[in-house]
Image (cartoon, coloured by chain):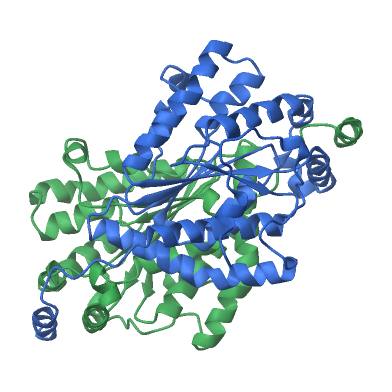
Chain colours: A blue, B green
């Protein structure tokens, strides 16, 4: 198979999101049907790696864990990845947090404060649906803080993610890339189905006027916050099946790289067996 | 189908756990194969009810939610229910918490303090893997607190669960009932498989000496804390497939009873549609 990581990974150069093909399927030559079959084939392996990661921490004292950071425009599929990809893991070993508009209490603290409270414990797979990157995205585009404030945050984020790496957190940052036209289609589908009206707000349309500003803000993020220890992966996401396949495979490759092992027994197995049989 | 609730529900009378058949399959006449098929058939309905419950809260202002409380002896399958039953839900709409030995900080607070911090938000399905009931189970059996202290807790628990009911939390309390012999088999399986050694601790065997005491403590819980608003359900759990089937169906019946509805649009759908098409 080779590595989907290599195919989707950024290297810190200048990024042109407008020029990228959001319907592309990098590192995948098959169609939807084959991709769904490949996802199903990955599931047992993902489940075992997750259990090993968990076991290694709770019984072996390892601090290793993984943090998946999901970013993308509205309707890009962050919630879909949680449902369709993370939904295949054992929920006991996942910690999912969706970052919303900061509360008054959160705003009274440094911007990374609320993020630190949601980090996965050792052995756990953490999932951020939005993240600290909102503090250099919406905060910049909608002018919630002054330019010097958000401009300083890129460095703070890189230092923060470096400390995560040093604490054995594997950080996997995924940008779900959809086109302006695809977002229109997805919002239309929500309007056309009464069961999906709850997902729609008129403000979603107003926000589209800021698309070029968000694109510029995302390009800055992908350029400035791609480091050796925490690079960004750009997943073309107009095709949902490819998005789910690519994120599944990114997780698989990173977990295989961690290579977690079941910890050895800290007791005499035969002695315990004999003792148990007497009860 | 009738109701599995009626078949498994206690009514506050005296309970004799030792006399109950832990291999029974109440309200199910088929075998394992048919039960697994029935679970699969329930999944779309469970998924839709979960989404409606969530939508009704986030877009409709409802406070309704569900809290599944899982209790049972070691190896009874609390983790198995989370993996195999809760694993079928959208993880975004679930809040799972496993209560461990209380920390020093938790012990410095009233026993319900840490529980209040883990209650599901409106629209969320909460799952307690162990719960406040440990404070009248292990706390009683192992003498962690004096008798007058734990004896007072039954009333405190009933009042607490009444306040949950009043705040629109549907509390579903499930006791996973396995036999003494079945626990031995399950512990043996853990010893026989090196990949499962991390789940075993020699203390698990020592704890078996207290089986009659735990049984007595559970009987007190099931007798004293079965109320009209938060009854206990006893699920015979020697057969894992029946356990998963019964918990799935209990959740389905309770969610159907809540009968959550997608909230209506708070905007003019046609006007928004026209506005979107101009972007």
Q: Residue A119: where, in percent of width, then height?
A: 39, 40
Q: Residue B119: where, in percent of width, then height?
A: 41, 43
Q: Nearer the viewer, residue A153 or B268?
A: A153
The residue that appears at 42% across and 20% down in the rendered structure is A110
Q: Residue B3: where, in percent of width, then height?
A: 54, 71
Tell whether B164 sits left or right of A223: left
The residue that appears at 85% across and 36% down in the rendered structure is B269
- Residue B64 higher or lower than A39, as above or below: above
Give the position of the N terminus of chain B as an image quadrant: bottom right
Tell whether A115 sits left or right of B223: right
Q: Residue A253: where, in percent of width, then height?
A: 49, 60
Tell whether A177 sits left or right of B1: right
Q: Nearer the viewer, residue A177 or B96?
A: A177
The residue that appears at 49% across and 72% down in the rendered structure is A44
- Residue B145 higher or lower than A277, as above or below: above
**What is the quadrant of residue B230 in the picture?**
bottom left
Figure label count? 0
Give the position of the C terminus of chain B as an image quadrant: top right
- Residue A248 higher or lower than B115, as above or below: below
- Residue B239 higher or lower than A67, as above or below: below
Residue A103 showing in the rendered view: no
Residue A212 showing in the rendered view: yes
**What is the quadrant of residue A101 in the picture?**
top right
């Amino acid at each position: 198979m080779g590595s989907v990581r290599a195919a989707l990974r950024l290297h810190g150069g200048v990024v042109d999101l407008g020029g990228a093909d959001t319907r592309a399927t990098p590192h995948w030559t098959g169609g939807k049907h084959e991709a769904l079959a490949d996802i199903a084939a990955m599931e047992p392996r993902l489940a075992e790696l997750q259990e090993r990661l968990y076991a290694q921490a709770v019984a072996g004292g390892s601090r290793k864990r993984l943090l998946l950071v999901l970013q993308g425009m509205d309707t890009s599929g962050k919630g879909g990845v949680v449902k369709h990809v993370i939904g295949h893991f054992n929920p006991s070993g996942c910690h999912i947090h969706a970052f919303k508009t900061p509360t008054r209490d959160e705003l009274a603290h440094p911007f990374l404060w609320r993020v630190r409270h949601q980090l996965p414990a050792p052995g756990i797979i953490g999932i951020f649906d939005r993240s600290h990157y909102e503090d250099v995205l919406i905060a910049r585009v909608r002018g919630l803080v002054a330019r010097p404030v958000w401009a300083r945050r890129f460095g703070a984020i890189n230092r923060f993610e470096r400390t995560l790496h040093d604490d054995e957190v594997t950080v996997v940052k995924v940008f779900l890339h959809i086109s302006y036209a695809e977002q229109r289609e997805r919002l239309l589908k929500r309007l056309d189905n009464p069961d999906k009206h709850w997902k729609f707000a008129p403000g979603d349309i107003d926000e589209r006027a800021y698309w070029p500003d968000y694109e510029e803000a995302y390009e800055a993020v992908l350029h400035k916050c791609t480091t050796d220890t925490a690079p960004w992966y750009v997943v073309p996401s107009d095709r949902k099946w490819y998005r789910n396949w690519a994120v599944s495979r990114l997780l698989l490759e990173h977990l295989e790289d961690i290579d977690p092992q079941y910890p050895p027994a800290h007791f005499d197995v035969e002695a315990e067996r004999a003792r148990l049989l007497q009860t």
